[in-house]
Structures are given as C-alpha cells and as structure tokens.
Amino acid sequence: MSEFVKGLEGIVAAQTEMSYINGEKGVLEYVGIPIGELSAHSTFEETVFLLWNRRLPTKGELAEFTGNLRDRYSMPDGIASRVTSVPKTAEPMHVLRTMISALGMHDTDPNANDADNARAKCLNILGQAPAMVAAFDRHRRGLPVIEPDTSLTFAENFLYMLNGEKPTETMARAFDICMILHADHGLNNSTFAARVVISTLSDVYSALTAAVGSLRGPLHGGANEGVMKMLNEVPSVDAVEDHVMGMLKRKDKIMGFGHRVYKAKDPRAKDLQGLAEQLAKDTGNEDLFAKSHAIEKIMEREVAAKGIYPNVDFYSATTYHCIGLQLDLFTPMFALSRLAGWSGHILEQLDGNRLFRPTADYIGPHAVAYTPIEKR
Ligand code: ACO
C-alpha cells in the first residue's frame, strides 16, 4: 500500500499538454510558451485556442474561433430570467456556479461527452459565463441588464455588459491580460475537481460546477478577495508594518502569499505587479499599490526563506480594483478565465479517461461489538 500524503502534495495524478510549471524557478508555460510572452503578445481568445488545440491558430482559425465564441455571448432566456430572480444578496460565485449547473438543463443532450460535443459545450459555457456575472451584478445594483455586443472581444464585452459603456483600450487590454494569466495552471484544486467529476463520465456542466465551487475557497481563487480586504483594513502605507507583523505573530495567513507548487515568485504575480502599478497610477490608486508593495517587502524579509512569495492573487487584487470591479467580483473574474483551463482539462481527461478512485488509509478501530441503542 502506498504512503498517505496529506493534501496529495507531489502526487502526479494526471498528464497534461497545456501548462508546465517549474515551482523552484518560477516558470509557467502554456504549451511551451512562457506566460510572459503570451501576456505581452497574445489575446485571451488566442490563448484559449492554444490551450484547447495545443498550438497557436492561424489568422483564419483565430477568426473562426473568435466568431464561434461571440455567437455564444447570449444566455438562453431561461437562464437570463433566473439570473435576475436570485436574491440580490447572493454571492456572485454562488450565482455563477448555479447558472453553469442550470445551463445543463437547457441542453437537450447534456451527457454527450464525445470530443466534438464536449468541446462545443465548453465553448458555449465560456461564451455565456460573462453575461451571467454581468447580468447578476446589474440586477443587484437595480440597473437594466445590458445585452452582449458581438463586435467586442471577450474582455471588452464583459466590461461593457457590466458598466454599460465600452471600456477604454487600456482597461480592456489590462483585463484581457488578467484573463490570459489566469487561464490555466496545472492540476490545481479546482482543475482536479473538474477532472475527478468528468472521470465518472458525468457531464461537462457538473464538472465545471464543481470547479467553480472549489475555486471560491479562500485558500484557492478566493484569496484575491482576501487580499483586497486586508488592503482595505490597513489605513495607510505607514500602518502596513504593524499590521503585517501582527498577523504573522498570530500565525494568520497573509492572503496572496504562498503556493503549493511555487517556491519562488509566481511569474503571473510579476506580470500583474507591473500592470497593477501602471493602473494604480492611471486611476489615482497609488496608495493601494504602495501598500501592496510594502507588504511584499515585509514578507520578503520575514518569510521568503520558507519559500513564501506573492502568488497570482496578490497583485490581481489591486489590478481588479483599479479596473473598477466590486470586491466580490474578483473571484468570478478568475473563474471566467479559468473556465478555459478547466475545459481543456475536461477534454484531456475524456480523451483516454480512467476513473479517479484513490484509497483512504483507514485509521479507526476494528471488530467493534454493536451496542444496542438503549445501552449507549
Ligand atoms: N502567510 C503566512 N505564512 C504562510 C503563508 C501565508 N500566506 N502560506 C504558507 N505559510 C506558512 C505556513 O504557516 C507554514 O508554516 P510552518 O511550516 O511554520 O507551519 C508553511 O508556510 C507551509 O504552509 P502550508 O499552509 O502548509 O502550505 P500549503 O502548501 O499547504 O498551502 C497555500 C499553500 C494554501 C496556498 C498557503 O500558502 C496559503 O494558505 N496561502 C494564503 C492563501 C492564498 O493566497 N491562496 C492562493 C493560492 S494561489 C491559487 O490558488 C490561485
């Protein structure tokens, strides 16, 4: 019998051709292309094509893929009416999770898991998910829902549906870069959840619903909201030192730091740091960036020796805030992007599937006599 490894650390449970991570050196590649190259030169749409096809598209292929995605920007009526009938106090991640699940009921053949059908369902969900989040946010703010605009990119269209006006080029590009950076990341918890569910030959909707549920936890994608809450709690740059040292003394986790795989600075955090700094300048949020930077410096001094560095969530908080997103939309933004990676992993899992079924090490008693209820 093999050894119990808490949290499955270091266990190889799947093979993937999508993303490669070297945690010691702080390297992330999608299909061999360094993440920094993609964030500098690619678009989210092209990155999704890359992940799903394991190669960059030609001009024609990209136009076709983008067109197909745009054709799916609208929610079916049944979903649109559901989104605007949920309680306004609901958490957007709960709404997204529930609506992806509900979408399965609008599919006349939800269990078709052959490669073409599974891919079409993934594309459908990726296309529609931004409308779900944007429509819910407008509903809770008492604003009319904005229909998608198929002349816009994935990033532009989301910000348009959310704000009712087209984003500036800078904001749209910043958001697009965030989408590229979050699109895939090996066998992280939510991706594993998606692969586990689809390995039963369940369905794409169920697998993606599980993934959204996993991502929202504060130890995973929910950390970006935790970072922002922490930044809001610290009144000024001068107060950072006492605040962070107090948290470390109490052994509180500093959100946005540490990673199961990276023992160096997460390369996505490097990209997001630059983006956050620029956006903070452009939007008058210099203080927010200065607080983040001060936290990083203290963490470098105090805990870097343990291999704890900023992860993707640390500077994404400042970035999303500067883009103008509400705090509880931060994790849904991560989900919109990661739908690409989850979907790619679902397709990989279905291609040569074997049911996930690990074992548990039973550590309870044996041969215990049954005690009748009146004698307990
Ligand atoms: N702040 C302070 N100390 C930390 C942090 C942190 N953020 N992260 C880890 N440590 C310390 C732990 O206290 C522990 O110290 P000890 O050995 O003295 O007890 C040591 O580093 C190892 O930490 P573990 O929690 O065992 O590491 P694990 O690999 O299980 O956890 C995790 C990784 C969950 C990401 C952790 O670092 C954490 O909770 N970080 C904060 C939440 C966060 O930012 N999550 C997002 C991760 S990226 C993503 O999922 C998108």
Image: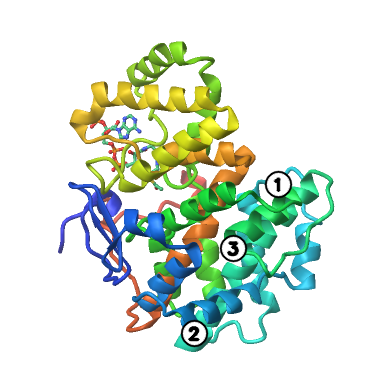
How far is mark 1 from mark 3, CA to CA? 25 Å
- Could you tell me which quadrant the N terminus lies in? bottom left
| Residue 329 vs residue 375, the one in the foreground | 329
- Residue 64 lies, in percent from the top left, at 54, 82
| Label 2 Cα neighbours within 10 Å, binned few <14 / some 14-19 / many ≥20 | many
| Label 3 Cα neighbours within 10 Å, binned few <14 / some 14-19 / many ≥20 | many
- Residue 279 lies, in percent from the top left, at 52, 37
Q: Give the structural element (helix, strand or loop) at label 3.
A: helix
Label at residue 113: 2
Q: Which residue is mark 3?
A: 154
- Residue 191 lies, in percent from the top left, at 40, 62
How far is mark 1 from mark 2, CA to CA? 32 Å
Q: Is residue 273 left or right of residue 284?
A: left
Q: Which residue is mark 1?
A: 90
Residue type of the residue flagged with mark 2: Asn
Residue type of the residue flagged with mark 3: Phe
Q: Give the structural element (helix, strand or loop) at label 1.
A: loop
Q: Earlier in the sequence, mark 1 or mark 2?
A: 1
Q: Is residue 140 left or right of residue 57?
A: right
Asked whether residue 288 is in view, the answer is yes
Residue type of the residue flagged with mark 1: Ala
Q: Give the structural element (helix, strand or loop) at label 2.
A: loop
| Residue in the picture at 47% in, 63% down | 43
Query: Which-is-in-front pick, marks 3 and 2?
Result: 3
Q: Quadrant of residue 254?
A: top left
Q: Earlier in the sequence, mark 3 or mark 2?
A: 2
